[in-house]
Image (cartoon, grey):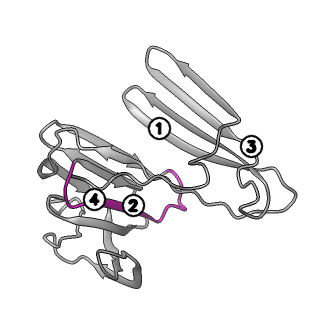
């Protein structure tokens, strides 16, 4: 019943320049390199490498851009990782986001930010996913940007209480200021980016 996953972006339809794969007793690693990533769609030149691995039960994901041109270039990346709810039931999911406000959106069809913020002052507010809140996604439409608390670890968790499985996403850069969460109000897939 869920809305299909939407894949898009400059890398979506590009063939890789090189692919790397390795595995050991505790890890599986894969990497893909893309030469001249912008291919005329953006100023400058850059190569991109995406590294993904599962090591000792943890998933790691990293995107690196290398400027191969002669001038500085602005680069920003986003990923849209979709997670399947292990139990298949959103009523079993608790979402934990260290945030005290979210961007207001115009409506549930266009989902455009209005430039205003919705602060959370009570633990039972629908968009409050702080550790003190219930964190339930059940029955909620989410396509919201949450501002992460400054000075706090940039850790977002999705916990399936029935299967006792926890997905933990950790932002390693101080440049990460927020997290976008998409859940279409039904189904067993959630995007946390």
Is 20 in front, or is 163?
20
Q: Which residues are magenta?
A: 172-187
Asked whether the residues under the numbered discs 3 and 4 touch, taking CB atoms below 8 Å apart as contact, a structural biologist would say: no
Q: Which mark is residue 183?
A: 4
Q: Which residue is mark 1?
A: 60
Q: Which mark is residue 93?
A: none
Q: Which tag is nearer the camera, tag 1 or tag 4?
A: 4
Q: Which tag is nearer the camera, tag 3 or tag 1?
A: 3
Asked whether the residues under the numbered discs 3 and 1 touch, taking CB atoms below 8 Å apart as contact, a structural biologist would say: no
Query: Could you give the CA–CA distance between mark 4 and mark 2, rounded to whole angstroms?
Result: 25 Å
Element assignment for label 3: loop
Q: Which mark is residue 35?
A: 3
181 in magenta? yes
* Dot 1 or dot 4, earlier in sequence: 1
Relative vertical location of residue 8 with respect to residue 102 in this rendering, above or below: above
Element assignment for label 2: loop
Query: Could you give the CA–CA distance between mark 1 and mark 4, rounded to whole angstroms?
Result: 23 Å
Q: Which residue is mark 2?
A: 152
Query: Could you give the CA–CA distance between mark 3 and mark 4, rounded to whole angstroms?
Result: 34 Å
Q: Which tag is nearer the camera, tag 1 or tag 2?
A: 1
* Dot 1 or dot 2, earlier in sequence: 1
């Amino acid at each position: 019943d869920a809305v299909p996953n939407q894949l898009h972006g400059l890398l979506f339809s590009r063939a890789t320049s090189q692919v790397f794969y390795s595995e050991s007793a505790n890890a599986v690693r894969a990497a893909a390199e893309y030469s001249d990533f912008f291919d005329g769609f953006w100023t400058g030149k850059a190569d991109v490498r995406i590294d993904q691995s599962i090591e000792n039960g943890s998933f790691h994901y990293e995107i690196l851009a290398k400027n191969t041109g002669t001038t500085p270039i602005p680069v920003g990346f986003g990923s849209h990782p979709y997670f399947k709810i292990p139990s298949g039931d959103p009523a079993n999911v608790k979402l934990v986001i260290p945030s005290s406000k979210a961007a207001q959106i115009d409506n549930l069809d266009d989902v455009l930010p209005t430039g205003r913020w919705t602060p959370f002052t009570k633990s039972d507010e629908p968009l409050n996913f702080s550790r003190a809140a219930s964190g339930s996604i059940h029955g909620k439409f989410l396509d919201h940007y949450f501002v992460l608390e400054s000075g706090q670890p940039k850790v977002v968790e999705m916990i399936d209480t029935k299967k006792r499985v926890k997905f933990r996403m950790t932002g390693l850069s101080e440049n990460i200021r927020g997290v976008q969460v998409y859940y279409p109000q039904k189904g067993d897939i959630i995007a946390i980016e």
